[in-house]
Each structure stands twice: as structure tokens, then as C-alpha cells.
Amino acid sequence: MDQKLKVFLTVVKYMNFSKAAEELFITQPAVSQYIKSLEQELNIKLIDRTNKKVRLTKAGSLVAYYAKEMFVLKTKMKQAVSDLTSEVKGKLAVGASYSYGEYILPHVLADFLRQFPHVEPVITIGNTHDIASKVQNQEIDLGIVEGSFPSEKLHKEKIATDRMFVIKSRKHQPKKPIHLNEETWIVREEGSGTREAVDMFLKKHNIQPEKTLEFGSTQIIKEAVEAGLGVSLLSEWTIRNELELDKLKVIGGEQLYFERSFYAITSGNPLSTKTTATFLDFLNQYFLD
């Protein structure tokens, strides 16, 4: 049944028989035959094809859901069996929030792969809520996030502390003294750990911005601040290059900052692979060395 399910999931992926045939390197009639055979085996219709449109039946949606689960479990089974050997190797699916994922994780992975060159990392970047959701659904092995996340089912370990500073453009200097209440604040979207930190910082210092701009990435925020659109609160890890190049300036120096923690989160699955466990240990030691 594996091949039939593989063909079925490929059709579901594209909702198109021709594109599924192209990906699988088989003919379209062969795709149709696999689907027909699967429907006969399960004794129920999975796909409606009317006016050349492909639509899943209710049974088709159920089969697609469980088929995906089966292939995920099969992959994890192979990895678990492989873990019986002493070598750390194989796939490592890691998700990280933007601040850590874009600015820190590449360096961590480079050092990790020097020790374990046979590991094959697959990286997903998203906001804190997105990554927590993927860990809970076991789409990724491990997540690295900041801020709070909605599930109490996930296991979390603190792996690093980060400081965030208020920044402004070095080039576009205001003619009058800066009053943070009067500045335009450039912030991340809701659901982002960085946005949560900004909201807490503003509340702590009783800052009520007259205007805010919401952008979906740290890089865009840095460019916007540099262009003189406003101020922001960002991790010291994300602004190092811009400070060195004299593009951005910190407001308030060492006195005005917000401290937050980064956490490694896992689903708590007792069948977690040796590779995942080794990487988690590596994360815990990384900033201690």
C-alpha cells in the first residue's frame, strides 16, 4: 500500500494528476490506476474529479491525514533504528524563531557539523508560535524560540540569555532630543517573540508610542530604522554588524535594555533520536564554553 499512498499524497500535494505524474516520473494513466486501486482496497471514493478539477472527499481528507502520519512515523522509525549505532548522523529537523534562526543558528550549526559531519540539518524559520506548533505536531525535531508559546505539552530548556536595545538611525539624526513616546516604533507581527518583548518593554517604561509600523522580519526593521522611519527594540545579536558599520546607534546605552531568554523546545517524545538529543546537549553547552 505504500506506493499507492505515496501516489495519493502526491496528487493531494498538487491537486492535479498531471503534476503528480511529472513528480513521480510515471504516466497520468498510471496515477489514475494507483488511485483507483487504493479506493478499491479501502472500498470508498477518495477523490472527486469534476470539470477537470480535483477535490478530496471527506474520506480522502482522512486518508491524506493518516497517510502523512504514517510516512512521518516510518521516517522516525528508520532514524530510531539507525540510532542503535554509536554514530550521530542522519536528518536533524530544527526550527527557530527569526532572531535566533537568522543570526545565531548558522554559527551553532557550523560548529556542530564540525564535530558531527554526517548530520543533515533541515532548517525552518518562523515566529515563535509557528515553531511551537510545528514541534507539537512533530513536523520538526526541535525548536528554538523566545517568549511564551501556547502549549503546555512542550518541554522547554533555557539555552541562552539575550539583551535587546533601543536603536535609531545614525545617518538620520533628529534635530530635537528624542522622546520615545513621540517616536514611530517599528515592531514585529503578533505571535513573534520579539513583538512580545517589545510590548513588555514599552509597558515597563510606560512608553505609549504615537505611531507604530509592523513589519514581518528583523532585517526589514533594521533597514527601516536605518532609513530614518523610526526606532525599534532589537536583539544585540541582530544589530552587531550595523553598529560596527556605524549605520545604527543605541539609545540609552547600557541603561535602557530588555533581557529575555531563548529556549529549546521539544515534544517530550521518549523516542527522540540520538542526533536530536546530542544537538540539544550541544545547545546547552554552546554559550558556556
Image (spheres, rainbow, N blue to C red):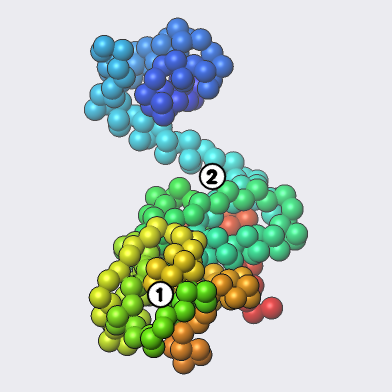
- Left or right: residue 40 versus residue 88 is left
Mark 2: amino acid: Lys
Residue 61 or 55: which is nearer the viewer?
Answer: 55
Q: Is residue 252 above or below residue 158?
A: below
Residue drawn at 48 percent across, 40 percent down: 72
Residue 188 or 116: which is nearer the viewer?
Answer: 188
Residue drawn at 34 percent across, 16 percent down: 39
For residue 277, what is the image quadrant? bottom right
Residue 278 appears in the rendering: no
Asked whether the residues under the numbered discs 1 and 2 touch, taking CB atoms below 8 Å apart as contact, a structural biologist would say no
Q: Position of residue 10 (x, y in %)?
A: 45, 25
Among the two numbered marks 1 and 2 on one chain, the one whose residue lies closer to the N terminus: 2
Residue drawn at 58 percent across, 57 percent down: 276
Residue 66 or 109: which is nearer the viewer?
Answer: 109
Residue 283 or 162: which is nearer the viewer?
Answer: 162
- Per the rendering, the mark at residue 24 is none
Which residue position is annotated with label 2? 76
Q: How many marks?
A: 2
Mark 1: amino acid: Val
Which residue position is annotated with label 1? 231
User: Badge 1: how crowded within 10 Å, few (<14), some, or many (20+)?
Assistant: many
Q: Position of residue 232 (x, y in %)?
A: 41, 73
Q: Is residue 259 above or below residue 142?
A: below
